[in-house]
Image (tube, rainbow, N blue to C red):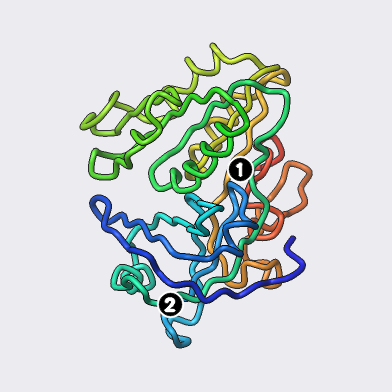
Amino acid sequence: MNKTILIHKCPIIDNLHITSNIYKMRFKSLDIALQSYPGQFLQLRVTNNLDPFLRRPFSISRVDKKQGIIHILYKKIGRGTSIMTRLKKDDIIDIVGPLGNGFKTTGDFTQALIVAGGMGCAPVFFLIDELLKNGKEINLLFGVKSIKQLIDFNKFGDLLNLTICSEDGSCGKKGLVTDLIMESLHDASQSSTYGYACGPNSMYKQIQNLNSNSDSIYWQVSLESSMACATGVCQGCAIKMKTNNYKLVCSEGPVFNLREINFNG
């Protein structure tokens, strides 16, 4: 849990419409960039007043630590994100963060199996950058509803093995991203592979069921939750664990060991 909550006033570099109702915003903050790790998130105030009252949480999508540039991906789904789409270059945005606990990207494993569904891909770019820096081989399974939600991973070139699927068959293989996991798990070595997943809880539950053996690979998952304070005070983002206690997504996550979460609670 973060002991000191820092509020930053950050100038926007650009705010681009990527595809369908998905946007990418870049802003400048050397302090945030230097403190950030893959899997952490930020709380954004989308106006200069208290309307909307609550900040919005967004995963850190990518970071340039030398230039002090932070990327976020977001989807236009409500009033707050609709306001965000109208922000432009040189506007100042009020940000709290980085918050939460991120992914473990170091260790004696050699391969990383990453599963991303829809907007769950947001923290994956930063994760991939860090894993590549640590010399890991990466297999990415990316699932979307249709080609309209497809985010471009081509910038990584042949630095990772990418498999795409879509529910309607408009890009990649037709089906759900979880349909691809069994083959990948069959080829994965428990001793040399770490699993990472970013997406909805329904996807995590299926991965958990597929990965139920005691000798299965170690999975880290990034949970999504509605957050008011994002600091552990309001306790509105509690999730049940298999030990029957609860943990807070904002301060004890958002990244958790998949084996510990009780999705049936």
> In front of the other: label 1 or label 2?
2
**18 to the left or right of 208:** left
Which amino acid type is marked by label 1?
Phe
Secondary structure, mark 2, is strand
- Circles 1 and 2, Cβ within 8 Å, touching? The answer is no
- Tell me if residue 81 comes above or below residue 35 in the rendering: below
Q: Quadrant of the N terminus?
A: bottom right
Residue extending farthest to the front is 66
Which amino acid type is marked by label 2?
Ile
Residue drawn at x 66%, y 52% is 253
- How far apart marks 1 and 2 lie (CA) works out to 39 Å
Using a 10 Å C-alpha cutoff, classify the residue at mark 2 as few (fewer than 14 neighbours), some (14 to 19) or many (20 or more): some
Residue drawn at x 73%, y 70% is 4
Q: Which mark is residue 203?
A: none
Q: Which mark is residue 263?
A: 1
**Residue 222: x, y in percent?**
57, 46
**Residue 71: x, y in percent?**
44, 55
Residue extending farthest to the left is 170
Q: Which residue is mark 2?
A: 92
Q: Nearer the viewer, residue 81 or 246?
A: 81
